[in-house]
Image (cartoon, grey):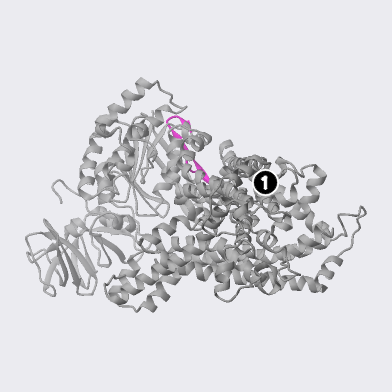
């Protein structure tokens, strides 16, 4: 693509930047506004827009309320769900990448299709089953159902990473005197470590964001995502506190998002697109 | 040869844990199917088999068709807006100016935040008393734009929120696709002398097709069964102006206890999603092979 | 004792034939080269011996034990992969030390270090021991792969085209080094290549393989001068051997009239050639003759006529392609000092001693005149 210095090109460039800025505002301003609201005292909420005296009292209130309990719940359930998915999904990803066996692609597609299943479809019968089995409103119940979100993602991402490793390396390690399991642990896992990290973080983000499952399959063991919405629905709304709650809930993922920049494309497309 | 046998079973052994979990997911699914043939309700204790009654009443119910229409509308609008906007922004971002470099890093944020939280933020922004958008909306003459509160504007509001959350998804994937395009076919076309349109139609599009298709599949499939955003913004209302199938089923089952009636709707939706994704993924695989032939 | 015996090895990948009915014997300390074009089944054969792949049928013996039920780790076989298969996360030292630390070998740290250094010095990579392998050149990687195989002191070496990704000069020098190393180590080796010069210069014996089947096994000169089939003759030699159909008439005890390349001439033959020709039904044979044996230019020996089609000077030799009177193309290798214009009329000949006779139907080797000392 040639770069001419003609005036038309310069206008085109300026237009390009203008349009990008336009989208940037669209994408980022709401977040900025949320942050602004979270440091605005209730007294000035209705009267001011950008000029006010910032305060941390909203955050203080939220942090000392029972909101933090829900924040921790979310943390526990999400981390545990990811760990379970790792233990179960890593070998499965390897099997789908390496072994040739009947029904391989069908199994792979079925696992992928879980992601597309309507959440409500699964929740309705699960609600009944959970009630009967006593899994309703438990950590274990949520961790189990979160697998619907985290497992397909993890398996498909890691499958791509395993496929990238030359099978010769495994053969070489076996010839060097290592059993299949030792090859898996000592040679393969270190090689897919970046994939593990990326997939793990992405799964964590999606688990953290999950709304429908905790809403309907849990009551007291609730996650911060659901609680934040309940705040808004209550009668006397302290908008500043709602904004602060939202900000606190969103903070972990913003940080994690910056960490997984490199593997984002692979992760989001479930390994279908290699970034 | 004992070890040959051991080898043949290895794949299944290794997959076993995942398969067990998979079965764990199939069970509710099968349970759902069974339940759909009963009159199970959350507030009565007697259950009886009613055959296809639930399915028939679903097909005869105007609510179902209305919800189907709403679902299709929602999916169509969201996917179209996000694909067009996403591709456009991705093309603009495929550049090395300062804004592009900055934006490439931060545009992920709307996507990473829980859609519900995102909806929450939009509710705050458009709130008539404290929302920041009140002023600008007045400026362009839409001072009493009701956003999620009015049946006329509810769908529009939903699409805005959905687009805000999910456009980055399209951007990131399409941008990755653009950046991975090999240079040599373009250099060859330059030497052979092809017009810009020719190059776009015969080189760029086929090579980009797999990425575009997979992005389309993901967005379409997920927007067809979107629940959180609609629930958080309008709960299906006002009235039933945004009552998608997912929300309809939720309403039937929970506030109104008609679990068995809700399931056929969801099974229908799931079948629709599965079928469309199956077809589209077939296109995607073929597009991948063709792209490999071009490049 | 580390002889190798392959019996009836067969491996199909779905419908695709990897190898079929491969039977091969390699003596203790022998260096066997396996030669064949891409896709011939060379890598499959090595994988079967190493145990990476299980055969559909057939068996493998190494030394005095059958290794069929054994995992690769238990066979005491080392392999140098075409892709080198080095461990990307390790340095050169760690790559070479890895096999020695395995549960199979489990050597004490001091001995590991000593062995790694010994072979690294032999391979001239001792100054690279702490380098990560990403920082190595192709040639250095190849030596590291070789070193990793050597440190184990295995019963058998398997080498899968180790030199094919090196540039020509490096390949040449590595070949010489390999020969020297071979002398020092004396381990049974199977060396796979698609380069026939490598096959001939390195191997005690050569096994020719194509389409999954072994075509011929023998000493390099045997395969070159007495190829078992037309296919083997064509695989060996560059430029490719000339093959023509010939009609034989009037066969006597010491001569026969040959009709080929649009001409007819009288060919002197010996008794063995005559009796071999008895086995042919019909009067046609396939004749093969190497470009290097073609005599170009008149000096009484040239009884065939043709027109120069192309002329490629290559330094010490040049390749001359001639259109014969009947239209068939004949390739000749001539001395580099001579030059020929395209479209020039020319005379050439094929000495009787360089003709190889093949059965026209089975394409199997029939006979050739015996080579005497000084023949070339």
Q: Is residue C64 magenta?
A: yes
Say whether residue B74 is left or right of residue B97: right
Which residue is located at x 26 percent, y 42 percent? C202
- The image quadrant of residue C98 is top left
Residue labelled with disc 1: A223
Q: Is residue C341 left or right of residue A111?
A: left
- Please determine whether, in this image, residue C208 is positioned above or below residue C184: below
Q: Where residue A229 sits in the image (x, y, percent)?
A: 68, 53
Q: Quadrant of the N terminus of chain A?
A: bottom left
Q: Eyeballing the image, is B132 above or below A138? A: below
Instruction: Residue at 40%, 47% (x, y): give it.
Output: C43
At 62% from the left edge and 53% from the top edge, which residue is drawn? A43
Position of residue C197 in the picture relative to residue C90 (left or right): left
C68 in the magenta segment:
no
* Letter of the chain that mark 1 sits on in the rendering: A
Q: Is residue B63 visible?
A: yes
- Horizontal side, residue A258 vs residue B228: left or right: left
Give the percent coordinates (x, y) of residue B185.
Answer: 35, 68
The x, y position of residue B155, in whole percent, is 66, 70
In this rendered view, identify the residue nearer to me: A164 or C351.
A164
Say which of C353 and B138 sits in front: B138
Counting from the top left corner in percent of width and height, residue C319 is at 16, 62
Residue at 38% across, 36% down: C90
Magenta-colored span: C52-66
| Foreground pick, C174 / A158 | A158
Quadrant of the snapshot with the C terminus of chain A: bottom left
């Amino acid at each position: 693509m040639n770069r001419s210095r003609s005036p038309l090109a310069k206008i085109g460039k300026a237009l390009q930047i203008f349009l990008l800025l336009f989208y940037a505002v669209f994408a980022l301003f709401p977040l900025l506004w949320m942050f602004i609201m979270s440091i605005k005292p209730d007294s000035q909420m209705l009267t001011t827009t950008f000029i006010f005296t910032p305060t941390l009292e909203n955050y203080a209130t939220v942090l000392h309320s029972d909101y933090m309990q829900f924040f921790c719940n979310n943390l526990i359930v999400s981390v545990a769900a990811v760990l379970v998915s790792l233990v179960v999904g890593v070998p499965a990803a390897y099997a789908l990448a390496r072994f040739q066996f009947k029904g391989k692609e069908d199994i792979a597609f079925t696992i992928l299709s879980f992601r597309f299943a309507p959440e409500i479809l699964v929740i309705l019968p699960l609600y009944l089953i959970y009630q009967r089995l006593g899994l309703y409103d438990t950590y274990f119940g949520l961790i189990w159902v979160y697998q619907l979100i985290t497992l397909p993602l993890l398996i498909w991402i890691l499958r791509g990473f395993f496929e990238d490793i030359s099978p010769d390396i495994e053969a070489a390690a076996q010839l060097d005197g290592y059993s299949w399991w030792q090859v898996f642990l000592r040679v393969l896992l270190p090689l897919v470590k970046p994939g593990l990290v990326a997939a793990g973080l992405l799964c964590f983000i999606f688990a953290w964001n999950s709304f429908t499952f905790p809403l309907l399959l849990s009551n007291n063991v609730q996650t911060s995502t659901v609680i934040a919405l309940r705040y808004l629905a209550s009668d006397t709304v302290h908008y500043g506190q709602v904004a602060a709650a939202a900000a606190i809930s969103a903070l972990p993922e913003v940080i994690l998002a910056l960490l997984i920049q490199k593997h984002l494309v692979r992760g989001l497309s479930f390994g279908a697109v290699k970034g | 040869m004992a070890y040959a046998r051991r080898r043949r079973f290895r794949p299944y052994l290794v997959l076993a844990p995942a398969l067990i979990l998979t079965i764990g997911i199939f069970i509710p699914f099968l349970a759902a199917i069974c339940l759909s043939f009963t009159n199970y309700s959350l507030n009565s204790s007697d259950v009886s088999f009613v055959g296809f009654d639930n399915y028939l009443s679903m097909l005869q119910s105007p609510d179902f068709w209305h919800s189907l229409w709403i679902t299709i509308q929602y999916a169509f609008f969201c996917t179209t807006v996000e694909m067009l906007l996403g591709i456009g922004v991705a093309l603009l971002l495929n550049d090395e100016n300062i804004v592009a470099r900055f934006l490439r890093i931060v545009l992920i944020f709307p996507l990473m935040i829980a859609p519900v939280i995102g909806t929450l933020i939009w509710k705050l922004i458009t709130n008539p008393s404290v929302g920041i958008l009140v002023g600008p909306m007045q400026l362009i003459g839409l001072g009493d734009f009701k956003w999620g509160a009015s049946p006329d504007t509810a769908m529009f509001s939903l699409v805005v929120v959905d687009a805000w959350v999910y456009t980055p998804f399209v951007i990131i994937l399409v941008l990755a696709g653009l950046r991975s395009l090999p240079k040599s076919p373009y250099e060859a076309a330059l030497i052979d002398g092809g017009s810009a349109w020719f190059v776009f139609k015969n080189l760029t599009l086929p090579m980009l097709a797999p990425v575009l298709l997979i992005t389309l599949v993901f967005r379409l499939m997920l927007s067809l069964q979107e629940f959180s955003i609609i629930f958080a913004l309008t709960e299906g209302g006002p009235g039933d102006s945004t009552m998608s199938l997912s929300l309809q089923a939720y309403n039937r089952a929970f506030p109104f206890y008609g679990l068995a009636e809700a399931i056929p709707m969801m099974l229908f939706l799931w079948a629709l999603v599965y079928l469309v994704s199956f077809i589209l993924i077939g296109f995607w695989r073929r597009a991948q092979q063709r792209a490999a032939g071009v490049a | 004792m580390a002889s190798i015996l392959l019996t009836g090895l067969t491996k199909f990948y779905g419908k695709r034939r990897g190898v079929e009915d491969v039977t091969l014997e390699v003596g203790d300390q022998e260096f066997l080269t396996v030669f064949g074009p891409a896709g011939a089944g060379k890598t499959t054969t090595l994988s079967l011996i190493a145990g990476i792949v299980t055969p559909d049928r057939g068996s493998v013996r190494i030394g005095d034990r059958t290794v069929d039920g054994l995992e690769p780790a238990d066979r005491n076989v080392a392999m140098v992969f075409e892709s080198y298969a080095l461990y990307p996360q390790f340095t050169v030292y760690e790559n070479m030390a890895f096999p020695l630390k395995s549960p199979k070998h489990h050597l004490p740290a001091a001995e590991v270090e000593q062995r790694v250094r010994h072979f690294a010095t032999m391979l001239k990579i001792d100054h690279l021991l702490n380098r990560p392998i990403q920082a190595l050149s192709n040639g250095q990687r190849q030596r590291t792969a070789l070193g990793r195989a050597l440190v184990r002191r295995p019963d058998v070496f398997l080498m899968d085209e180790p030199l094919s990704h090196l540039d020509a000069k490096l390949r040449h020098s590595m070949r010489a080094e390999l020969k020297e190393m071979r002398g020092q180590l004396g381990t049974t080796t199977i060396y796979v290549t698609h380069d026939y010069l490598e096959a001939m210069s390195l191997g005690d014996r050569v096994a020719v393989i194509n389409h999954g089947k072994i075509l011929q096994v023998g000493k390099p000169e045997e395969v070159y001068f007495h190829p078992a089939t037309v296919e083997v003759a064509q695989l060996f030699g560059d430029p490719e051997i000339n093959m023509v159909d010939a009609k034989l008439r009037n066969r006597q005890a010491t001569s026969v009239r040959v009709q080929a390349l649009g001409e007819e001439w009288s060919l002197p033959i010996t008794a063995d050639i005559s009796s071999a020709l008895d086995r042919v039904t019909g009067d046609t044979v396939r004749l093969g003759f190497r470009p290097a044996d073609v005599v170009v230019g008149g000096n009484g020996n040239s009884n065939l006529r043709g027109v120069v089609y192309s002329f490629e000077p290559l330094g010490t030799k040049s390749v001359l392609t001639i259109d014969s009177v009947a239209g068939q193309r004949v390739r000749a290798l001539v001395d580099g000092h001579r030059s020929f214009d395209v479209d020039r009329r020319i005379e050439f000949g094929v000495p009787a001693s360089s003709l190889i006779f093949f059965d026209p139907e089975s394409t199997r080797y029939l006979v050739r005149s015996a080579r005497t000392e000084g023949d070339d």
